[in-house]
Image (tube, coloured by chain):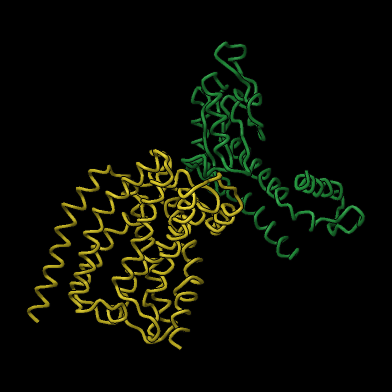
Amino acid sequence: MNLITALARLLIFPGLLFAVPFAWFFLWVERKAVALMQGRIGPPFMQPFFDFIKLLGKSTPPRSGVGGLLMRAWPLIAVSAAAGAVGLLPVLPSSGGFEGDLILLLALLELPSMCIIAAGFSSRSIFGEIGSAREAVLSVSYNVVFLLAIVSIAASQHTFRLEALAHLPASPMQILGVVAILVCLPAKLHINPFSLPNAEQEIYSGPMTEYAGPELAMWELSHGLEWVAATGLVATLIAPHFTTVWLAALVFVALSFGVVLLLSVTAAATARLQIDTTVRFYWQCTLIFAVLAISSALFMRFRS
Amino acid sequence: MGETMNLWNRLMCYSRRRSPWLFHMNSGSCNGCDIELIASLTPRYDAEQLGVRLEGSPRHADILCITGPVTHNAVEAIKTVYGQVCGPKAVVAIGSCPATTNVFIDSRTLDGPLEKHLPVDVFVPGCPPRPDAIIQGIAAAAGILAERAAKRWPDESVMVPLAGEEGSCSCAHCDCKTEEKSAADSPVSEAQP
């Protein structure tokens, strides 16, 4: 029974069967929001799906040796890690089966960006290497804040278990932590104002420059799944606890959609920052905020 | 098996028509056509409604948009970039320069027109062409891509009537019989050289 529940969570809801259409939907929302903010009509509803199918039908340049094998492997690892992260989200109140904790979720959320760094370097393209170097610098900057925010949430609730975190009533510390996570999400999802790694036109496409066809389709899919996982993490942390299954699912979807809309509108309203400005932003402004959050959480914990 | 291949092919053709990604290349243009190409992506014309996306890398593109009369310096560059675009691909020549070298004809710095070097699918004439003409040209190129995709699949011969079965085509106006036969012939001849 436990195995069946775990498989159902990974494959159906909130796993692959739910996550893949929603990944395309969120990619569409991102593009549509930018279009509406610019006074355009924007792409049709099915656009990310058409893009995905078209990319599957394109040819890829011949790659040989270990480097070529690695280049084919990175997008697949990224997609499976992102799908696994979505499958771990504690959306439904029913327990049983494999329950991951926050640390496993964080590791799975971090894997796609590791894969992007590795992909850029193994592509041997100069633009890919610049993009990967930027991604690495960015990742070092925002991850400190991101991890501190997560730790402050866990410290304020006395647990790292996802089920427990989703079901406990929200404390003020948790709200502070969620805001810190929201500040990190644009960098994690490579959207404006922190779209440095894949800076379109500026360094061609960054780490993705050498990718084509089905491999590029996998990168697009992993980007969409990252959207679902990252916004889903915020949604489960702020969602109130429901015992009804469909109500919990509905609230989860609505909250994720809200976060996607907020991030897309921010992306459309801002321009790309330079790498030094970005790093300074995370190290100076947000780090202070995150340190405040974690110290007050620890203080509250020892007082109680 | 044939049914699913048929459905997949139709989906693929439809997707190719709905999702043309461009790579823009300047081969010595005066920048007039380049401005008009960018104008076709702006709010007034909004080519993204057709799924058009201007890509940074030629590896991602389906359609290569070339402006300019092809200078000596640009010849190797356009050949390299054409090789970097992954198939199936189409080439759109934007403006009068790549079509005829325009007012620069007989210049000693030119090695044009474009068709000397690359197979061009769609010409968009004008000096510069209007953005709506450019969008029309891109849409035509996307249609060509979709047709090319249909021919690319070797299993295509399964779904069209074979040589002996004349009249088994189910569509209403059966002018397409001859066209489909030729479409069926070419992949077979490709598969068995």
Q: Nearer the viewer, residue A129 or B112?
A: A129
Query: Residue A159's spot in the image, x, y percent?
Result: 23, 79
| Between A266 and A27, the one nearer to me in the picture | A27
Number of marks drawn: 0
Is residue A189 toward the left or the right of residue A12 in the image?
left
Q: Indicate the quadrant where residue A133 lies.
A: top left
Residue at left offset 44%, top offset 74% = A14
- In the rendered image, the vertical position of residue B8 relative to residue A96, given as above or below: above
Which quarter of the figure is the C terminus of chain A placed in?
bottom left
Q: Residue at x 73, y 52 (%)?
A: B154
Q: Colour in which chain A is shown?
A: yellow
Residue A189 drawn at (x, y percent): 36, 56
Q: Nearer the viewer, residue B154 or A152?
A: B154
Residue B60 to residue A152: above or below: above
Residue B124, percent from left and from top = 63, 31
User: x and y percent of residue A262 in the render?
Assistant: 35, 60
Regarding residue B11, the answer to whether it shows in the image is: yes
Where A303 sits versus B32, above or below?
below
Query: Going by the image, does B18 lie left or right of A68?
Result: right
- Asked whether residue A28 is in view, the answer is no
Residue occupying the point 33% across, 57% down: A188
Q: Residue furthest front?
A: A65
- Could you tell whether A132 is left or right of B138 in the image? left
* Residue found 35% across the figure and 56% down from its top: A114
**Rendering colour (chain B):** green
**Looking at this rendering, what residue extends furthest in the bottom direction?**
A1
Q: Is residue A115 left or right of residue B148?
A: left
